[in-house]
Image (tube, grey):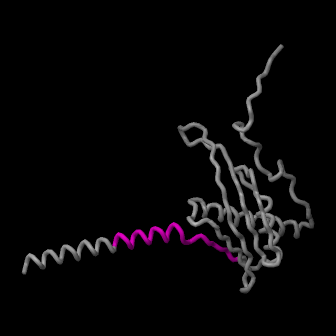
Amino acid sequence: MCRKFSRMQTISTSARSFVWFIALGLLSMVALIGCTTTSRDYPGVAPDALWKAAVAAAQHPRYSDWMVTENGVFLDEPQRRIEVYRELKRDFAPPGAALQRQSETWTFSIHLETDDRLPKVVIDTRSTLRAPGFWKQTDHFFGEIDARLAQGATAATSGDDQQPASSGANALESPSALEKAPTARRDG
């Protein structure tokens, strides 16, 4: 009898371990797949001004450390929805390492919700697995909206409606030296 009880207890312990293993696996899958949507409220901002700032941020992105190589934007004004496909590249040198070419591709959807009293911008990624830099990209996009709203408020108070001059098509730095073929110089 004791031998039988000991054997049943071992089976019970292994079954419990198996259930914990499955539960941890499911939780890790949810952590990777879930949470691909984020939003920010904009109290005191007119929905039309917020829409214009979101459109400008989508159509004319500004990055200090990345170069935009492709920026596809689809606008659905009646639904207040923007679809963005964006490819970014940069040259990056980690400390003590050689220069590396990095690239990222982002596909996300922006939706302006005005059903509540507060206008809200919702950003959603279409990928099945959340990319590691998703939160950084959404923070960057919200920052772009904030900067354009502040720029619009400054222009409205100063009476100046002109956009600041940019150094390039998207106010980005020049293409990398790795993209240019070296030219031979001949003194003669």
Given the current orientation, which residue lies at the most extreme left position?
1
Most prominent secondary structure in the magenta stretch?
helix
Q: In the image, residue 60 lies at what x, y percent?
A: 80, 59
The answer to which quarter of the image holds residue 157 is bottom right
Quadrant, the C terminus: top right
Q: Is residue 46 visible?
A: no
Is residue 172 positioned above or below 178 on the image? below
In the image, which residues are magenta? Answer: 20-41
Q: Which of the pair 11/168 is nearer the observer?
A: 11
At 74% from the left edge and 52% from the top edge, which residue is drawn? 68
In this rendering, position of residue 44 left or right of residue 19: right
Q: In the image, residue 73 lies at what x, y percent?
A: 78, 63
Q: Is residue 126 visible?
A: yes
Magenta residue check for 25: yes
The answer to which quarter of the image holds residue 1 is bottom left
Is residue 147 positioned above or below 172 on the image? below
Q: In the image, residue 31 lies at what x, y percent?
A: 49, 69
Is residue 66 positioned above or below 47 on the image? above
The answer to which quarter of the image holds residue 178 is top right
At 81% from the left edge and 16% from the top edge, which residue is drawn? 187
At 28% from the left edge and 75% from the top edge, which residue is drawn? 16
Magenta residue check for 39: yes
Q: Which of the pair 43/142 is nearer the observer?
A: 142
Count of number-bearing discs: 0
Q: In the image, residue 164 lies at what x, y percent?
A: 86, 56
